[in-house]
Amino acid sequence: MTLLSGLLGNALLSGGVLALAGMGELLAERVGVLNLGVEGLMALGAVSAVITVASTHDAGLGVAASLAVGAIAGGVFAIATVLARASQVLCGMALTMGGLGLAATIGRPFAGQPSAATFRPMPIPLLDQMPVLGDALFRQSLPVYLAYLVLPLALHLLLFRTRHGLTLRAIGENPAACDAVGIRVLPLRFAYVVLGAALSASAGAYLTLGFVPSWSDGVTAGRGWIAVSLVIFAGYRPWRIVAGALLFGLVNALGYLAQARNWGVPSAFLSMLPYLVTLLFMIVPALLSRGRPGATAPAALGLPYYRDQR
């Protein structure tokens, strides 16, 4: 029972990083912008959080710093892709490479040092006394509750239960039609790309203040790319992103458990296993979504919008 509880707890911690980053990517893609810079955003968010808590010893300020840095980087990306209409793929790759390089440079003095402040568990009274599930589910830190419950619920209500959410989804499907009825397509695209980038960067803060917790070059370990694939796997829906993140976290936790218990599985295979699952994330939805409405990408995803070409 203790083994199962530890496995579930580790899976929640590991998957929470992907859940946060995936929510950020979801916001951008729902308005038709493909942001492949999530890996770079996470690295910038991770290092800015570590640097901030080194001087303030406050994890909350570390998250705030990561949100601000992510919003700035997202603003630059949005200027290039939404306003200047540059290639979203090339700009996303530039954001990833630039973010990783900048984070490695400014984070060098902090490499290998434990974070000066971390998120502490926040037990939920009564529920944390449940056998097995109590320790795993209800003695987590605040970012875990946000990643698995608050944010997906808020995004689901926003996208599928409000008029504004309908507008956002329509922009991702047919921006020209939205523009024709008076919807301000470019400002909304810009705003949600910036908001999504900030949220993706906060996943980096979660990584270095809650999951690892320390900074090192390459600490994101490809999680940004996995978050992008997770959005596709989830059919662009918040609750499915949560389920996919938990599944990935479980695979990751099984790898750690196998190494700790010396199950005889080659370490190279265990390191590869989460990324193998990612490939399945890409293949399975493509096979299952044929003919299913709402399971495919927004029609205008990755396409710049030119108002004079409506």
Image (tube, rainbow, N blue to C red):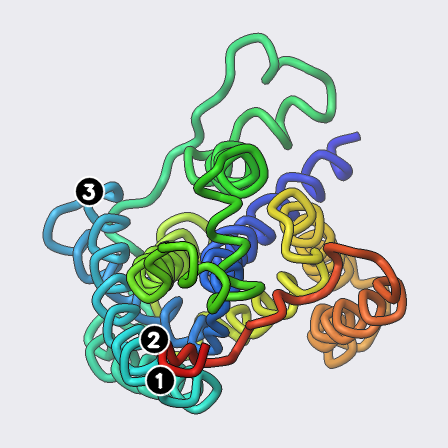
Q: Which mark is residue 82?
A: 2
Counting residues from the start of the chain, the first of labels 3 and 1 encountered is: 3
Q: Which mark is residue 85?
A: 1
Decide: is 180 above or below 77: above
Q: Residue at x 47, y 69 (%)?
A: 176
Q: Which mark is residue 74?
A: none
Q: Residue at x 76, y 71 (%)?
A: 273
Side of 7 relative to 303 (left or right): right
Q: Nearer the viewer, residue 258 or 128?
A: 128
Point out residue 73 in the picture as x, y percentages from the top left corner: 26, 71
Q: Residue at x 10, y 54 (%)?
A: 55
Other residues around mark 3 within 10 Å, as few (<14) / some (14–19) / many (≥20): some
Decide: is 283 above or below 119: below
Counting residues from the start of the chain, the first of labels 2 and 3 encountered is: 3
Secondary element under disc 3, as helix, strand or loop, is loop
The amino acid type, in three-letter code, at marker 3 is: Asp
Mark 3, residue position: 58
Other residues around mark 1 within 10 Å, as few (<14) / some (14–19) / many (≥20): some
Q: Residue at x 79, y 63 (%)?
A: 262
Side of 137 relative to 200 (left or right): right
Closer to the observer: label 2 or label 3? 2
Using the rendered view, name the quadrant where residue 44 is placed: bottom left
**What is the spatial separation of the Cα atoms under label 3 and label 1, in whole angstroms?**
39 Å
Secondary element under disc 1, as helix, strand or loop, is loop
Q: Nearer the viewer, residue 53 or 230?
A: 230
**What is the spatial separation of the Cα atoms under label 2 and label 1, in whole angstroms?**
5 Å
Decide: is 216 above or below 149: below
